[in-house]
Structures are given as C-alpha cells and as structure tokens.
C-alpha cells in the first residue's frame, strides 16, 4: 500500500473538514445573486445559524433580529422601513416583541417626493397607520415547542393611533379557550374561540427558527385592527377600529407557484391575506438551514405589494357603481390590483442580529 505523507494527510483532512462545515448549512436560495443587500443578508444568516448552533437554546438570554423592508411607490419613489424582532428569556419563561417603523424616502429623489409632495405624504401616512405596530407576546417552552400565553398590542404615545384602544389576547389552557379584548383596559373580553393548538405570530416565528422542520404547517391566531375613518376630515373621535379575530392555517414549504422562482420557499395563507395590507396569498423567501441542529432563519423575502386602504375603498365604491347587483368584488380587485396598491416589489432583508448569553 502506498504511504501518505503527514503534510498530505493534514491537507486532505483540512479540505474534508471544510466541506463538512459548508454542507452543514444548507442555503435554500439562488447563490448567483448580485444584490448587495441579499449578499449581506445571507452572510448574516450564516453567522446567526452557526452562532446559535454552537450553543444550547436554553443558554441564550436574548436574540434580536433586524430586518430592512424596501419597496417601490409611485413616481419611482423608493421607501425603506425597519423591523425589529426580539426574543428574551425571563426566569423560566420568555417574551417576544415586534416593531415596524414608518417608511422613509430612500435616496435624494425619493426623500424629496415623499416629504414634499402632499399627495404621497398623506397617502402613505394613511397607509402606515395600519402598518406601524408594536406587539409583545409572553411565551412558555414545553417539550421542545414554544406556546403563547398572552399577546398585547403596545401603543406608542407618539403614534398617530395613540388615542385608539390596544388589543389583547389571552390563551387559557385550563379552559382550552382563547379570549380576545379589542381594548385591553376593559375587564370583559369581546370574543372567545376554542383553543386547537393555535399560537401567536411571534411564537410561530421563533418556533420555526428553533424547533419546526423547514417545511411545516402552523395554526396561527390572526388578530388584526382594521381602522376606518367615518368622516372626510378624520379626527381621533371619528376613527372607528374594527377587529378581526380568527384562526388561520399557514403552510410553509417549497415554492411550487411558478412565480418568483429565485425564491425556493413560500409561506402560504390558506384563508388568503393574513394582513389585509399585504397583496397576494404568498410570501416568497430564502432560508439558511443547519440540518444538524435544525436552526434556520429566513434572510431574504419578496412580497408582491402593499395595499392602500384608501385606494381600495375608492375602488370598491367605483365597482359598486359599475356592478350595482354584485355583492363580492374579489375577482375585479384581483384583475385591477394595480389600482389599489400603494407600493410594489417589497423586499425584506436580514440586516443584523444580536445574541446575548
């Protein structure tokens, strides 16, 4: 048998170890991208997955994820928002928060149009009343799965919605019920639905990162504030919040839609639009997944568009005049969707993360 030198052995062993390290993290994405934001996001995702995989979940005190949201508006105005997700250990339980900022013009032209042209400023302020949110969930861990105890909306004192009530949801595991308050300051709840393994959105997101398989079904609680202005010149007293409270099955799997083929994964809402400001039934995304530890994180996503509620209301009025005997205009809204979109080509990128042990 031919011998092998010590130097050659070390070289082969080193190359093999490097290959194993690369194979451990599976990137469900197109590796040929030239988008600098996506390249940075993928790098951050690999760093995050490798960092979490080296340490047990129970040793982590907090995780903070920063995402950038970029979108295109009319007149080629580019807008940017920032989303922050936090997951924090608190003695034997956990809590998680989510915040999404208002949009800002990105670049000189976009800043000028967005801030100085009244039409766009007013329309996007109206749109963002329904997007700018802060949520907090209280969570417990049981048998390698996270469960929601409570979800609360946190109302900012400086928000344009500061005078509106903040909602709350309690998961009562003793009675197997989920209770909903449209105004968390009230003692009596407004609605109840039966508990059948639903979880709140932030709980679902971090379950996906830590415990779920990369293709899975999740039963979510959808609690959504739908704001309506009853007057042409709205005031805080004329703003009427309506609340949607329901269960929603979300299917996560490979992209079989034939659309946005560069994104190999989709998140599909079985009942349709989960947030009524998002256009389309799918969110398309790319994922880094460590198959050994099962730690995973979405780092790039595509959403077809953001709906302007003002434009949608105006379009519905037009359709009702055009078809006075019809009661549903779903087909017409889909066929003429450009008339109701405030922005298109919405892209989301992981920009940074922080882990504290």
Image (cartoon, grey):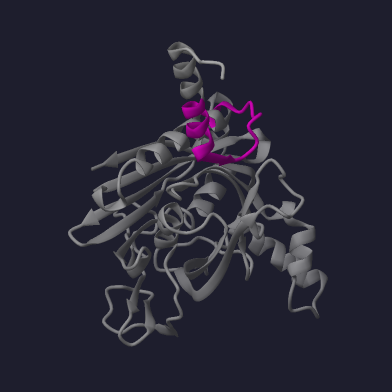
| Residue 248 as seen in the image, left or right of residue 65 | right
Identify the residue at image location x=52%, y=53%: 126
Which is nearer the eye, 242 or 248?
248
Q: Report which quarter residue 322 is drawn in.
A: bottom right
- Give the magenta part as a residue range: 16-37
Residue at 65% from the left image edge and 46% from the top image edge: 264
| Any part of residue 146 in sight | yes
Left or right, 7 with respect to 357, comes to right
| Residue 56 belongs to magenta span | no
Question: Does 123 appear above or below 91?
Answer: above
Provide residue 304's location: percent of width, then percent of height: 66, 49
Q: Quadrant of residue 145?
A: bottom left
Q: Left or right: 35 with respect to 69?
A: right
Q: Position of residue 129 (x, y in %)?
A: 47, 55
**Residue 262, percent across and down?**
69, 40
Towards the viewer: 321 or 204: 204
Residue at figure coordinates x 54%, y 26% from the top left:
107
- Which quadrant: the C terminus? top left
Quick one: which residue is furthest to the left in this view? Answer: 91
Rendered-image quadrant of the N terminus: top right
């Amino acid at each position: 048998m031919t011998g092998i030198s010590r130097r050659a052995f070390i070289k082969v062993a080193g190359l093999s170890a490097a290959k194993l390290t690369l194979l451990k993290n599976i990137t469900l994405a197109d590796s040929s991208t030239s988008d600098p934001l996506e390249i940075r996001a993928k790098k951050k995702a690999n760093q995050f997955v490798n960092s979490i995989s080296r340490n047990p979940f129970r040793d982590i005190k907090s995780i903070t994820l920063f995402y950038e949201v970029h979108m295109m508006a009319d007149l080629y105005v580019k807008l940017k928002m920032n989303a922050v997700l936090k997951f924090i250990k608190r003695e034997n339980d956990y809590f998680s928060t989510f915040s999404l900022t208002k949009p800002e013009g990105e670049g000189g032209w976009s800043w000028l149009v967005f801030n100085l042209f009244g039409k766009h400023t007013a329309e996007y302020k109206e749109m963002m009343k329904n997007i700018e949110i802060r949520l907090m969930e209280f969570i417990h861990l049981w048998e390698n799965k996270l469960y929601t105890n409570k979800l609360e909306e946190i109302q900012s004192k400086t928000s344009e919605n500061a005078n509106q009530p903040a909602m709350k949801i309690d998961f009562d595991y003793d009675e197997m019920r989920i209770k909903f308050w449209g105004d968390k300051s009230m003692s009596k709840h407004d609605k109840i639905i039966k508990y059948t393994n639903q979880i709140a959105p932030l709980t679902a997101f971090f379950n996906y990162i830590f415990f779920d398989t990369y293709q899975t079904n999740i039963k979510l609680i959808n609690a959504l504030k739908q704001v309506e202005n009853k007057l042409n010149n709205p005031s805080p007293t004329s703003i009427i919040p309506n609340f949607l409270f329901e269960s929603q099955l979300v299917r996560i799997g490979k992209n079989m839609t034939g659309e946005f083929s560069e994104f190999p994964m989709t998140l599909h809402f079985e009942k349709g639009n989960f947030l009524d400001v998002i256009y389309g039934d799918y969110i398309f995304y790319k994922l880094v997944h460590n198959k050994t530890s099962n730690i995973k994180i979405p780092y790039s996503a595509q959403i077809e568009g953001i709906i302007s509620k003002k434009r949608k209301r105006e379009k519905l009025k037009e359709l009702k005049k055009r078809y006075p005997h019809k009661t549903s205009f779903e087909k017409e809204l889909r066929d003429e969707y450009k008339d109701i979109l405030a922005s298109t080509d919405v892209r989301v990128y992981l920009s940074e993360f922080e882990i504290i042990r």
